[in-house]
Amino acid sequence: MKLPDYTKAKNRKDKNNEVISFNIDKSLINKYKGKKFFLKTYGCQMNEHDSENIRALLLKLGFSETSDYKDSDLVLLNTCSIRENAHNKAFGMLGRLKNLKAKKKNLIIGLCGCMAQEKVVVDQILSKYKYINFVFGTHNIDHLPKLLDKSLTDNTQEIEVYSEEIALVEDMPIKRDTSYKAYVNIIYGCDKFCTYCIVPFTRGRQRSRKKEYILKEIEKLVQDGFKEVTLLGQNVNAYGKDLYDDYSFASLLEDVAKTNIARIRFVTSHPWDFTDEMINVISKYENIMPSVHLPVQSGSDRILKLMGRRYTKNEYLKLFRKLKKQIKNITISTDIIVGFPKEEEQDFLETLDLVRKCQFDNAFTFIYSNREGTAASKLKDETPLKEKEERLQRLNKLVNHYFLKNNEALIGKVEKVLVEGVSLKKKDHYFGYTEGNKLINFTGQNIKIGSIVKVKVLEAKTWSLDGEIYE
Ligand code: SAH
Ligand code: SF4
Ligand code: F3S
């Protein structure tokens, strides 16, 4: 048994950039043929991407996938710790699984992802959730086959969570969600330690993947006919800092653009280290999408300081305006937290003022959630929840107003759209995303899923556009 430990997870001293190739014990391949798994993902894109690796590992073991957990032999929850409601969802599911296991004794239950990295969660599993068969963390996904097998063969509860990073694993098997859009990890972990955030504990130290591996993966995706890659990291702007002296995220973006993949996206960018080189590269290459997710979190300098965000409202606005000016047709989205400890009405009004100035294309808004072990969890939080909820409502009303306004400005324009699906009800109704990352529903005939087409925007809604195929 190997348990999580926050003191170790906080450690940023020992560098470990060791890279190993994925390896599987051959005797496990197809050992579980005939069994079915149900995999549920609760977190961010990084978490979803991990699930694509997990799915491939389970398929290798011989399992097939089912979308009905009641019909499965193995249920695996890939969890998220970012806010309390993510926790509650996973624990709610564990409750349902307990009932199912009472009827179906051979059901295997596993838990992985960010919650597995939390000591409080694993302690709870050890004391109250004895029916969970195995637990592994974010640093050792490649150990899944052997852990699952051991738990089943020895009939034991296997818990293996590393708090400090172990080697980066290359060549992990992967079963991607689509055949035209792909996530590609470029940097793991985070060293920013924003005071409210649990990610630096659950995902460990910032570690970049070597550029050769990234470019090789993308070249293969191009060969396989993929149209879009999303470069993933908790803060992609920090790419390369731990590996190279003179190769940055801007250098990587440029090299990726040269692979000729049709569309490149990247998430997430921290405003603090968004460089001019990055702006130059984004504006220079047509296949780098003019769409940036730039979380601001708050418009109050006092709160930004308490959050440890390393920029002021004015510095954010300056960067925002520079992006708008230098990148043609750019769309900018953001994340905002309300009700951070010590946030007063005056601070909140600063956030509303910033929203009025930026008029974001999209925004994810959250009520602050206290995460055990973070620096902010030690701050006194006196604002009643009711007041926080009211702030969230006021904020949402304002951000929604600008989503609609920005969408309305697109009426009559022709947008390039990556087609992602066809409506189940009406065969001539399709949907996809514009270069600016806006969802568009449109009509047309015999359009190939995964192709890039031109669509004329006819109508605007708050969260989507309506249109028709052009030409
Ligand atoms: N690495 C990314 C995103 C991390 S999590 C970044 O830094 O932008 C995504 C969003 O969740 C954050 O931007 C933040 O707005 C929100 N979030 C993180 N921790 C939170 C907490 N404790 N309470 C509420 N929202 C939180
Ligand atoms: Fe969390 Fe901040 Fe790192 Fe984003 S940059 S993952 S909010 S610590
Ligand atoms: Fe959640 Fe972990 Fe992602 S906490 S948001 S799954 S990095």
Image (cartoon, rainbow, N blue to C red):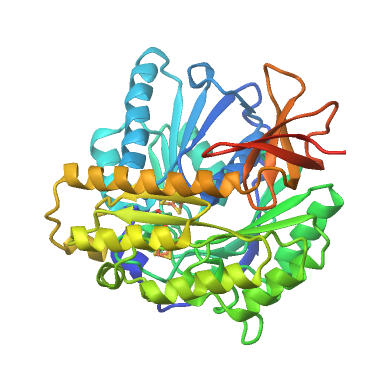
Number of numbered callouts drawn: 0
Residue 337: percent from left, percent from top: 33, 55
In the figure, 324 relative to 176: above or below?
A: below
Residue 200 seen in this snapshot: yes
Q: Is residue 277 above or below residue 439?
A: below
- Residue 153 in picture, x, y percent from top left: 49, 33
> Which residue sits at x=42%, y=49%?
399
Residue for point 71% across, 46% down: 181
Q: Where is residue 117? Give x, y as percent.
A: 37, 53
- Going by the image, does 54 lie left or right of 93? right
Front residue of 130/262: it is 262
346 or 294: nearer the viewer: 346
Left or right, residue 216 beside residue 80: right
Relative to 20, is 32 above or below?
A: above
Q: Nearer the viewer, residue 286 or 228?
A: 286
Q: Which residue does the image show at 66% across and 31% down from the upper left?
A: 62
Q: Quadrant of ligand 2?
A: bottom left
Image height check: is 452 above or below 329? above
The picture quadrant where one finds residue 253 is bottom right
- In percent of width and height, residue 260 lies at 83, 61
Tell me, yes or no, if residue 238 can be seen here: no
Q: Going by the picture, which residue comes out furthest to the top?
A: 103
- The quadrant in which the C terminus is found is top right
Q: Residue at x 80, y 55 (%)?
A: 262
Q: Residue furthest bottom?
A: 245
